[in-house]
Amino acid sequence: MTKLRRRVVSIPAVILGAVLLLVLAPIWLPVTLIVDLVTAPRRLPRTRLLLFGLCWSWLETIALGVCFVLWVTRRPLGPWYTLQRWWAARIVGSLRVVCGFRMDVEGAGVTMPGPVVVFGRHASLADSIASLFIVAPDAHTKPHYVLKRELLADPCLDIAGNRIPNHFLDRAATDSGPELASLTALSTGMGAEDVAVIFPEGTRSNPKKRARALEKIAARDPARAERLRGLRHLLPPRPAGSAALLAGTPDSDVVILGHIGFEGLDTFGGILRRLPRKPPVRMWLRRIPRSEIPADDTAFTVWLDKTWLTLDDEVDTALRAEAGPTEVEPA
């Protein structure tokens, strides 16, 4: 779908959705409250989800209006970064107020000074939005994200995200060369205020996806598949994109971003089962000097695999500590 056709659909849809959710609130709010009081009186998940949808749609609508003003007045990149930060802050704030999300962060600030490249765990769309405040701890930090192209369906990500140096990756591309070249270009020339962020798993994890990924790896590289068999919560990392991002910024350190608390929030049913989120979301970061990261492609893949296995162990330990004596299900 071309940019114009996509935006002709997505922008009116979001604005119309915001208006309808607000105007029809006297109807849907009592209905969802009654259903929740019967089925889940202590959690009220449907009511919370629709209230979050109301907040999100109006934040999108407001941000779209700001995008229009910035575009008409031909503003430089600074205000666009400010808008991106404001939008993400309000989304996270809505999750906190409506859905009970709180965040505890270990290692905040390790991304500065830049340039750094962040390799983050990916469990839901919420973690990519929430991570903005972790990897960009102040208003001067300039984050550059690698995101999947499907997220262009969100008009704010589409418009503001394409004004700022980000890259929306086409995961279905038959020729990966142009995509990898774009990642290298994205990180080229980064300075002390720049952070590039990529999610090496490429998509949200679940047992079926992990099994399929290991099968594909085994067909090409049995030794690597065997090395990654121990993963319980994460997907095998895709080294090509991470290596391409590092190639553009040879002086950058790497920051590993792990977290728990977003598990199961990748489907509508999962969200309903887990709202509100009572224990705080835990996020942790650790910085690895560039001198410890191999430059050779094969050695880098081995290093990334071992780093991901370590992160998987950290996630498992954190989940077990939160769950207590109950068994932790693989993600």
Image (cartoon, grey):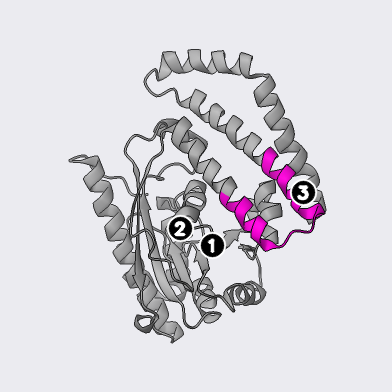
Dominant SS of magenta comes to helix
Residue denoted by label 2? 137
Tag of residue 140 = 1
Residue type at the position of mark 3: Val
Marks 1 and 3, how far apart at CA: 22 Å
Q: Earlier in the sequence, mark 1 or mark 3?
A: 3
Q: Is residue 79 shown left or right of residue 314?
A: right
What residue range appears in magenta?
61-85
Asked if residue 123 is positioned above or below residue 313 in the image, the reply reads above
Q: Is residue 66 magenta?
A: yes
Q: Residues within 10 Å of mark 3 (few under 14, many from 20)?
A: few
Give me the residue at 46% from left, 83% from top. 297
Give me the residue at 47% from left, 65% from top. 200
Marks 3 and 2, how far apart at CA: 26 Å
**Mark 2 and mark 3 in contact (Cβ < 8 Å)?**
no
Of residues 132 and 75, which is closer to you in this image? Answer: 75
Q: Quadrant of residue 303?
A: bottom left
Give me the residue at 62% from left, 14% from top. 26
Marks 1 and 2, how far apart at CA: 8 Å
Horizontal and vertical percent position of residue 72: 82, 53
The quadrant of the image that shows the N terminus is bottom right
Residue type at the position of mark 1: His
SS at badge 3: helix
Residue type at the position of mark 2: Pro
Residue denoted by label 3? 69
